[in-house]
Image (cartoon, rainbow, N blue to C red):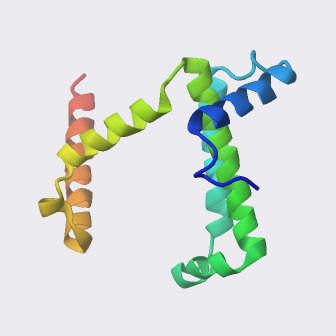
Amino acid sequence: MRSDTEVTLDQLKMSVKKFVESRGWETYHNPKNLAASICIEAAELLEVFQWVSLDEAASWNSAPSKLNRVKEELADIIIYCLSMANTMKINVSQAVLAKLEKNQARYPVKKYYGEEGMEAVLERDSWTKRNESKHMEGV
């Protein structure tokens, strides 16, 4: 098995593209279907953790059967994300690095570090949602 240090993002994107093309699935791999598939696979990953305590979930790193299920669901999500990037011609590296830069500016370490920082994020997000819904009511 090859590792993350041996396989580039571009190689993964090309593998996904070849998989889709070899089956004639390009028509089905459109942005709407891919967005839905990403959500469905993410829900399947969430289902793996349903009704599991935080401690139990943390212990799965040493439980091969549980870890394999998580790997498979995560792989499905990543495959659909890479197919979305292929379909929409998105440079994943640029998109991720740009988003991280935006998040660094939005959540400076001094203000958003640790538990207090997470509370500030939650407070900010709930304030934003309240104001967005007020704005939408007036539209």
Farthest top residue in view: 27
- Corner quadrant of residue 56: bottom right
Left or right of 127, for residue 33:
right
Where is residue 31? Give x, y as percent: 60, 22
Farthest right residue in view: 23
**Residue at point 72% right, 32% down?**
16
Where is residue 25? Give x, y as percent: 80, 21
Q: Is residue 89 above or below residue 33?
A: above
Tell me the quadrant of the picture where the C terminus can be found: top left
Where is residue 53? Give x, y as percent: 56, 81
Q: Is residue 10 above or below residue 90?
A: below
**Residue at point 70% right, 46% down?**
76
Can see residue 36?
no
- Corner quadrant of residue 130: top left
**Residue at point 65% right, 29% down?**
83
- In front: 2, or 126? 2
Farthest front residue in view: 6
Q: Is residue 37 above or below residue 29?
A: below
Left or right of 35, for residue 44:
right
Where is residue 3? Give x, y as percent: 65, 55
**Residue at point 48% right, 26% down?**
91
